[in-house]
Amino acid sequence: MPASEQSKDPGVRERKRRETLARIAEVGLRLFITKGYENTTLEAIAEAAGISRRTFFYYFKSKEEIILVWQSTFTQLIRAAVVAEPSDQKPIDAVRNALTKLTAAFDSDQSIIMDRVIRSSETLMSASHAKYVAQEQAIFEALCEKWPQARRRKSLRYVAMVAVGAFRLAIDAWSSDGGKRAPAAYLRESFAALRTAF
């Protein structure tokens, strides 16, 4: 297909848009890790990504949004992982197993650095709390897809809420320990503690 035709092809344009967005996000995250969030400017991100400042704003409203996009990707993975779990188990076990599998695949070194980047900024910490609301909703929707009976919706909402709470405590413990052990280990302990609490 000639270049002139490719530029008119919505599929090609969308692929290029996604590739550019991913490149900007990757560059931004790398700079946040190496220079620190506060010390990384929009200009530095744009320059490293090979785009103009104006183009940056076509993809992101702010540098903070790069972190939010990174976090939302994990939320999407959580939903898919819960849906993929077998239905012949309790909903809370399905969520625990899904999260354990996901965290087992964490790049622990990069994740602990990104966690420190987020905790270094009040702006990022405030925005980061919203991710837990999104994760709860994603888990709830996944559980409703697996167990669609209307009578179960309230209990599935509870499962989503407590599961995200257990996940949050596990990640906090992992971060406080400086990632000495794999995130999945903290997650298993957190869900075990949840079981003994009721």
Image (tube, grey):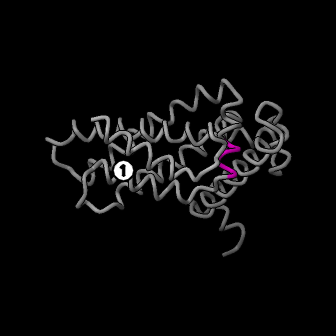
Residue 154 drawn in magenta: no
Farthest residue toward the bottom?
1
Element under label 1? helix
Identify whether 29 is placed above or below 98: above
Give the position of the N terminus as an image quadrant: bottom right
Identify whether 62 is placed above or below 59: above
Q: Position of residue 149 (x, y in %)?
A: 16, 47
- Is 98 left, or right, of 121 in this rendering? left
Identify whether 8 is placed above or below 67: below
Farthest residue toward the left?
151
Give the position of the C terminus as an image quadrant: top left
Viewer-proximal residue, 144 or 92? 92
Identify whether 6 is placed above or below 27: below
Q: Residue at x 81, y 48 (%)?
A: 51
Q: Position of residue 82 (x, y in %)?
A: 37, 54
Viewer-proximal residue, 144 or 50? 144
Q: Residue at x 55, y 50 (%)?
A: 183
Q: Residue at x 42, y 35 (%)?
A: 165
**Residue 163 falls in image quadrant:** top left
**Residue 158 falls in image quadrant:** top left
Local packing at callout 1 (Cα closer than 10 Å; few below 14, some 14-19, many 20+) is many
Q: Position of residue 106 (x, y in %)?
A: 58, 55
Q: Which residue is mark 1?
A: 95
**Which residue range is magenta in the image?**
109-114
**Amino acid on which the number 1 mark rests in the picture:** Val
Magenta: main secondary structure equals helix
Q: Residue at x 60, y 51 (%)?
A: 181
Residue 112 drawn in magenta: yes
Q: Position of residue 13 (x, y in %)?
A: 63, 59
